[in-house]
Image (cartoon, rainbow, N blue to C red):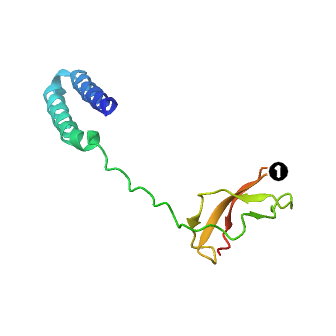
Amino acid sequence: MADTTSRLDAIKEGIRKLANLAGVEQAEAARQLAAKLSADVDALAPEITAQPPAPPRPGKGPAITPLHGEIRCPVCALRSFTYQKGTMRESADAITGFEAFYHCLSCGHQAWHEAALD
């Protein structure tokens, strides 16, 4: 938040310097515009520097585990594609409605795979 405040102050200072660079014939218009832009920045400052609401914490997910903790890896074809505990999530694409994250203990392949539930 302090970084945002300092950045807004730097913007206001830049606006002031830009107004001072205007020629004599446009100096008053430049100062008025600079004052308006600074007021706009001041009006936005509370919204920008306000602490954003905390995003909702995701639920723990279903308290279910896949029927098969270890299946055949799609890459190396060994039976070492292992379910990673606590990674179950809902999936609109899966027939069962859930998918789980698997990691192959042999070749290292990792992927989300449809969960066969008990």
**Front position in the image: 82 or 110:** 82
Q: Residue at x 86, y 60 (%)?
A: 78
Q: Residue furthest bottom?
A: 95
For residue 11, which quarter of the picture? top left
**What is the secondary structure assignment of the residue under circle 1?**
loop
- Give residue 16's position: percent from left, percent from top: 22, 25
Residue ID for mark 1: 107
Task: Answer above or below: position of 69 versus 24.
Answer: below
Q: Quadrant of the C terminus?
A: bottom right
**Front position in the image: 66 or 28:** 66
- Give residue 73's position: percent from left, percent from top: 80, 61
Circle 1 Cα neighbour tier, 10 Å, few/some/many (<14 / 14–19 / ≥20): some
Q: Quadrant of the N terminus?
A: top left
- Give residue 52's position: percent from left, percent from top: 31, 47
Amino acid at dot 1: Cys
- Give residue 111's position: percent from left, percent from top: 70, 58
Position of residue 90 in the picture relative to residue 83 (left or right):
left
Counting every numbered tag in the picture gives 1
For residue 70, which quarter of the picture? bottom right
Q: Residue at x 21, y 21 (%)?
A: 20
Position of residue 47 in the picture relative to residue 72 (left or right):
left
Position of residue 29 in the picture relative to residue 69 (left or right):
left
Task: Answer above or below: position of 1 versus 97.
Answer: above
Q: Residue at x 15, y 32 (%)?
A: 35
For residue 46, which quarter of the picture? top left
